[in-house]
Amino acid sequence: MFYLLNTNKTNCQADHDWMLANRCAATFGKVAHKIDGVAAGSTVFLYESGRGIIACGRAGAVVAETACGYREGRVRHRALEDFAPLAQPLNAAQIKTALGRNVSFLATLIRLPDGEKLLAAQKIQK
C-alpha cells in the first residue's frame, strides 16, 4: 500500500521539520489518529506544500506517541524505514501526471492504491 502524507509545513514549520529530523511519518492534534491506519510496510511519501514529494520510506510496525516539545498534546508517528530524501522533489503536476488523475494535496493523509507509479516516476527504490 502507498500513502501521501502532507508534512503540514504551511501551517506549522516545526511539524515538517520534526518529521524530517526524526525520519518518520507523523500526525498531530485532532488528526493524530490517522497514522494508525497506515499499515506496517506501506510506502509513505512525505509531501511538502509548494514543493512536492520530498522523501519517502516504509512505515515501521510500531505506532509511537510522544511529546514533541513545541506544541501541546502528543504526536503519533511511525518510523520510516529506508528513509530516502529526494534530491529533486516530485512536484504536484508531476504527481498528477504520473498517477493520471487529480490528488487532494490539502488532505493530511491519503491512500494511493496506484502509488507504485510515483516510485517509477522518481525512480525511487523501495
Image: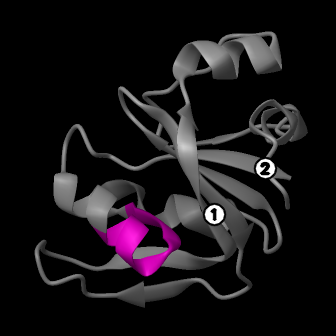
Q: CA gap, disc 1 to disc 2?
A: 8 Å
The stretch drawn in magenta includes residue 100: no
Q: Is residue 14 above or below residue 65?
A: above
Decide: marks 1, 2 in contact (CB < 8 A)? Answer: yes
* Front residue of 76 and 42: 42
Q: Is residue 9 above or below residue 40?
A: above
To which residue does mark 1 refer?
84
Which residue occupies 84% across, 57% down?
125
Which residue occupies 42% across, 79% down?
22
Residue 31 in the image: state x and y as whole percent: 41, 55
Residue 1 in the image: state x and y as whole percent: 86, 53
* Front residue of 14 and 104: 14
The range drawn in magenta is: 18-27
The secondary structure type at the circle numbered 2 is loop
* Front residue of 1 and 21: 21
Q: Amino acid at mark 1?
A: Ala
The stretch drawn in magenta includes residue 19: yes
